[in-house]
Image (tube, rainbow, N blue to C red):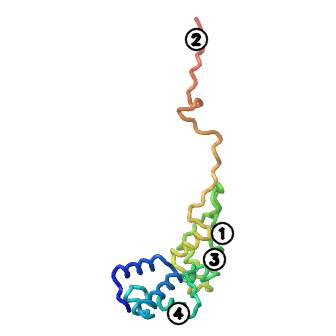
């Protein structure tokens, strides 16, 4: 390995941080071959890069095949995806107690049943024996399905006339009508 000054090391490291994905791995593999004799372990200690990323970059250079990143496959799946019948059971439980917005201002359905009550009802379903999520997760599923926990209100009719205010002429008191007094 050729001697690298602190400025060169800093320039190589900053160039690596500007790149992402396969371009970063490609650059790291080039620097590992040039300054570290193709050793991912030495590149890790010299430049502070992850050894697995450098090894992947070296393999991509050697084979000519680029590895695809699987960012979409990471993380936990939503409860509805992991257990598709969960959504149907929630609809069957909540729909009888749900009501649309009385003024039709939103697409949400308001319901009185709580997430805890839905969870307890789901625990009694034998098909979902081991896959019933927690209370907070059930609440999130309810929100994703378009349900909101709110007291169901009856639609109130609009008032026919607006309430008079002090500034409107309609609220002024009429002048008293003077009646003529009888003369004796």
- The Cα atoms of the two marked residues, 4 and 1, are separated by 59 Å
Q: Which residue is mark 1?
A: 96
Q: Which residue is mark 2?
A: 181
As helix, strand or loop, the secondary structure at mark 4 comes to helix
Q: Do residues under tags 3 and 2 come within 8 Å of each other at their CB atoms? A: no
18 w.r.t. 45: above or below:
above
As helix, strand or loop, the secondary structure at mark 3 comes to helix
Figure label count: 4
**Sequence-first tag of 4 and 1:** 4
* Drawn side of residue 38 relative to residue 140, left or right: left
Measuring from the top left, give residue 17's x and y in whole percent. Answer: 44, 78
**Sequence-first tag of 2 and 1:** 1
**Mark nearer the viewer, 3 or 4:** 4
Tell me if mark 2 has few (under 14), some (14-19) or many (20+) residues whose alpha carbon lies within 10 angstroms of its own.
Answer: few
- The Cα atoms of the two marked residues, 3 and 2, are separated by 82 Å
Q: Residue 51: which quarter of the image?
A: bottom left
Image point (51%, 89%), residue name? 57
């Amino acid at each position: 390995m050729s001697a690298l000054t602190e400025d060169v090391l800093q320039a190589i490291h900053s160039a690596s941080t500007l790149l992402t994905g396969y371009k970063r791995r490609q650059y790291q593999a080039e620097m590992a071959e040039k300054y570290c004799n193709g050793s991912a372990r030495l590149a890790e200690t010299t430049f502070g890069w992850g050894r697995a990323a450098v090894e992947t970059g070296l393999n991509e250079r050697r084979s000519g095949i680029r590895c695809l990143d699987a960012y979409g496959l990471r993380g936990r799946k939503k409860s509805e995806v992991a257990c598709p019948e969960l959504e149907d059971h929630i609809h069957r439980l909540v729909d009888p107690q749900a009501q649309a917005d009385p003024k039709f201002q939103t697409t949400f359905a308001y319901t009185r049943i709580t997430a805890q009550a839905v969870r307890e009802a789901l625990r009694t379903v034998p098909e979902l024996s081991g896959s019933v999520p927690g209370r907070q997760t059930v609440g999130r599923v309810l929100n994703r399905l378009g349900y909101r926990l709110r007291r169901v209100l009856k639609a109130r009719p609009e008032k026919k006339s607006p309430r008079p205010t002090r500034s409107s002429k309609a609220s002024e008191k009429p002048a008293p009508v003077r009646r003529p007094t009888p003369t004796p």
